[in-house]
Image (cartoon, rainbow, N blue to C red):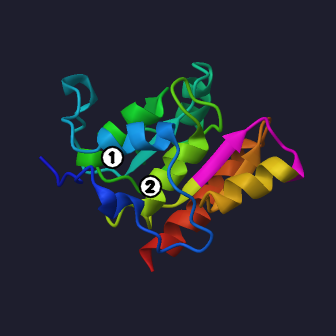
Amino acid sequence: MGSQLPADESLTDTTLPDHKPPTESQKRITTTMARAIPEKAVFAGSLPLILAADADPMMEQVYGMAFPADMFRLAIVHTALDAVRILADHPAVLIISEVKLNDSSGHDLCQAVRRSDEWRNIPFIFVTPIGSTEAIVKGLEAGADDYVVKPFQMDELRARARRLMQRARL
């Protein structure tokens, strides 16, 4: 079993500029970091893992086409809590998230990832239909590395993901 993060103040430090206290939703995400991962979410294999959090079940097929099974393992979840459970034991090379998830917001997930010493360097992309300048700025300020507005071109998402994953390996 991989390392697990304690659910304590170390995840809510103030090392980032303009740090705001965590919301109730962020606290809920943080407290699940030490819980065991569900058996059905255990992954085997040596291919890099991409974690996608999206409330829309239709996106499972889209992400499956964008990131083929012969190149990546793809874990698709619908809640931020499930995303954190997977990350606890399965290192990801990329996180893709919708802004609106079933239990929380993608912003809360992104901020929880950025507060974690273990996960903070994983590239994070928001993929969402919310394309206002205000929404994009909010997503980037939450810690996302990129922001893609739905609908999108598959080649564009792959290129952005590839660039971020390559940069993260440097």
Which structural element holds mark 1? helix
Q: Residue furthest front?
A: 21
Which structural element holds mark 2? helix
Quarter of the image for residue 118 reads: bottom left
Q: Is residue 74 visible?
A: no
Amino acid type of disc 2?
Val
Q: Residue at x 60, y 46 (%)?
A: 107
| Residue 108 image label | none
Q: Choose the circle earlier in sequence order: 2 or 1.
A: 1
Q: Residue furthest bottom?
A: 170
Q: Marks 2 and 1, how far apart in space?
A: 9 Å
Binning the other alpha carbons within 10 Å of mark 2 as few (below 14), some (14 to 19) or many (20 upward) gives many
| Residue 113 image label | 2
Depth check: 153 or 16 in front? 16
Binning the other alpha carbons within 10 Å of mark 1 as few (below 14), some (14 to 19) or many (20 upward) gives many
Q: Is residue 93 visible?
A: yes
Quarter the C terminus occupies: bottom left
Tally of numbered tags: 2
Depth check: 21 or 83 in front? 21
Q: Residue furthest right?
A: 132
Task: Judge from the rendering whether residue 11 lies leftward or rightward of residue 21; answer left or right.
Answer: left
Residue 150 placement (x, y as % from top left)? 78, 37
Which residue does the numbered mark 1 point to in the structure image? 87
Amino acid type of disc 1?
Leu
Q: Residue at x 41, y 66 (%)?
A: 13
Q: Residue furthest top?
A: 57
Depth check: 144 or 141 in front? 141
Highlighted magenta segment, given as a residue range: 125-133
159 vs 129: above or below: below
Residue 115 placement (x, y as % from top left)? 43, 61
Residue 38 placement (x, y as % from top left)? 23, 27
Q: Are marks 2 and 1 in contact (CB under 8 Å)?
A: yes
